[in-house]
Image (cartoon, rainbow, N blue to C red):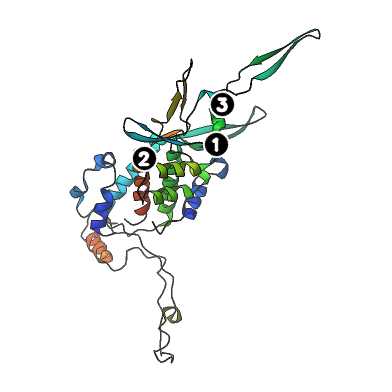
Amino acid sequence: MSDLNPSHFEHAAKKSVKEELRGAGWPVYKDYEVVTEDGDAFVVAPVSHASFFEAEPREVVVQEGVMKGSRQQRFAGRDPAKDAITFYAPLRTPELVLDLAELAERETTPQVVLEWAQVYGLLGFPDEDSVGSDEGFMKLKVNGMGRRDRVQRFTEAAGEIRERASGYSKP
Amino acid sequence: MPLDELLSFAMFLPRKAFVPFGPMERHAGKERSWLLHVIGRLIQMRLDEYCFPQFAVHTNGGIATGKFSLAWLFKGLIGAIWLHMAWLLDAEGQRVKRCKLPGCLRVIHFEPGRSADDLGSIKDADGTFRKNARGTYKTRSDREFCKGRPCTQNYHYRKKAGWKGYF
């Protein structure tokens, strides 16, 4: 892996796909937490009713003609993606691969995954990336938004990337 | 990479990646070729799992401009990481030259030439200049076989003997 550096990835990406076609974003959330479900540790960016609904009701002015008007108060649904403190373009971030490979060289604890998430976001395996909230009268669910990683799966994926990167050009 | 290192590397590859090719033990003498096949399949599996192409129509104020683009998108950050890996191998495949002997596939290292001064052999221990001190030549750009192994001889012997795949 010592042969590889981010410039290799940058060069390869530039050669393969135009810069403007590598702009797809990935969220990094403000809060992540470690939770345990059925003995498995997960790192989660939780959602709650508070994150879906704005705390303050939004006022909408409804005006019908000049004489008749009213003021309504309603709760507006809030895009859960607004929890993200930033969206960045992973395909323009070549250091991602080596940083993940380096992470796999030491023990991957939930804390390590949480620290990684605070920088790059979670890996977001599509079949497990689902978080919800069952507070009160309404069930909320968010899928495919990089909000939930199983620590074990993160470790396996990082190990696979490390093995591939360390075997780079050697065979 | 020596065979034992190759074996330890292969141990970490998911079983599903080498199902179509069988275990490495069945490919004695062609382990490197087997490994490259497996890596290719592994990357394909991950791209299938986490990435997808997207064909976009360019518009200006809602009106199609007649331009189109083919982009790659990912399902999860893990998909973006595998796209980087795939692009790296694609680009390196064009840049890296491997030994021409079928089954060897070792990377040919192109080393720059070094002068006697660089090598530190220009002077004797007492500081006097050596006569005919020489450096090393850079690797020839048309090199086809790896260094320090009998690949050239094997290749030409097999070619002469009419082996399949030796042109």
The secondary structure type at the circle numbered 2 is helix
The residue labelled by disc 2 is B44
Left or right: residue A90 versus residue B163 is right
Residue ranking furthest to the right = A66
In the rendered image, the quadrant that contains the C terminus of chain A is bottom left
Question: Local crowd at mark 1 within 10 Å, few (<14), some, or many (≥20)?
Answer: few
At 38% across and 56% down in the image, what residue appears? A1
The residue labelled by disc 3 is A79
Q: Position of residue A107 (x, y in %)?
A: 35, 48
Subunit under mark 2: B
Subunit under mark 1: B
Left or right: residue B152 versus residue A78 is left
The secondary structure type at the circle numbered 1 is strand
Instruction: Judge if badges 2 and 1 mark residues of a common chain.
Output: yes
Instruction: Judge if badges 3 and 1 mark residues of a common chain.
Output: no
Label 2, label 3: how far apart the Cα atoms are = 34 Å
